[in-house]
Image (spheres, helix red, strand yellow):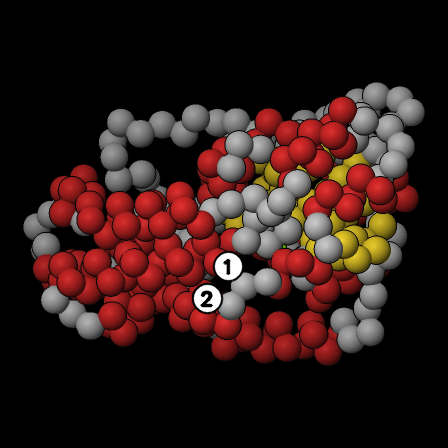
Amino acid sequence: MRLLVTDLDNTLYDWVTAFARSIRPMVTELAALLRIDEDTVYAELKSVHRRHHNSEHPFAVLELDSVARAFPAATPVELLTLLERPLAAFNAARATWLRLYEGVSDTLGALRARGVVIVGHTEAIGPTARQRLRLLGIEHHFAGVYCLANALGPHPSPGWQDKGGVPLHVVPREERKPNPALLRDICASELARPEEAVYVGDSLTRDIWMARRAGVCAVWARYGRGYTDEDWATVVRVSHWTPEDVRREARLRVSATGVSPDHAIAGFGELLGIVPTAAARPVRRRVRKVG
Ligand SMILES: [Mg+2]
């Protein structure tokens, strides 16, 4: 095996838990600051996320209707100060809850030492995914990250600059998981044949079904569903998913009935037993840097 394509959220770290537990204290602080109930904050957050087709739209709180009503004349920079407590509550909780699953960093390092090229594949937008890999201290293991296209507005701080980092390869929205052509394209871009690649992910309907149909060894991270119902409910409550998204998910589940992975792992470190050999020759990489 010369190429590992890894899903990010709930394969390398528990995104559901970290996101839900960062959102809740932020909503509590926002409701107190704006003197409104938490239900209203959740509904307004969902509406901003829907507008941007992104449940993690950066600085969504600056666009809440209640914020506009409370601070009608404030500039984005002023809002950052006015909303300092809710934003700090989110960041503090994320620092507590965003944690790699056990063995992830060591395993990525060991695979890289064996000559395996590692790329990420996520339906998060690129800058958000890259920031997460950086916060978790694993960005240096990645040769690239394949991510969804999404337009981001300007950062609210005028002096802010994107630090760059791991190359981002933008995937069109119509080529989302579980499209097997997308995974075959990723293999081709990384100069690996599908049979030389391993895909690891926590979703049977998206990751595993896609990998199996692409002819790529499919490894199911079955530990990725270890979050609580309460945390999942919080994610759904603020998510951008439309009724059509929910119907699409239901259709996918039906289509993927009976799909089984080549391997199921109880911890990321078990990949070392599945990807045992080093690449025989160095992989010449063709990088399409887009961000
Ligand atoms: Mg996932």
Up/down of 253 relative to 32, above or below: below
Q: Position of residue 219 (x, y in %)?
A: 79, 53
258 shown above or below 23: below
- Residue 54's place in the image compared with 243, above or below, is above
Residue 180 visible in the displayed image? no
Residue behind mark 2: 231
Disc 1 and disc 2: Cα gap in Å?
A: 7 Å
The local crowd at label 2, few if under 14, some if 14 to 19, many if 20 or more residues have their Cα within 10 Å, is some
In the picture of the structure, the residue carrying the numbered disc 1 is 16
Nearer to the camera, 267 or 241 = 267
Relative to 204, is 139 on the left or the right?
left
At label 1, counting other C-alpha atoms closer than 10 Å, the crowd grade (few under 14, some 14-19, many 20 or more) is many
Residue 175: mark: none
Q: Residue at x 33, y 45 (%)?
A: 92
Q: Nearer the viewer, residue 286 or 269?
A: 269
Three-letter code, disc 1: Val
Residue that appears at 20% across and 45% down: 84
Amino acid type at image mark 2? Asp
The N terminus - image quarter = top right
Return the x and y of residue 64 as percentages of the image width and height. Answer: 24, 60
Q: Is residue 225 visible?
A: yes
User: Mark 2 falls on what kind of element?
Assistant: helix
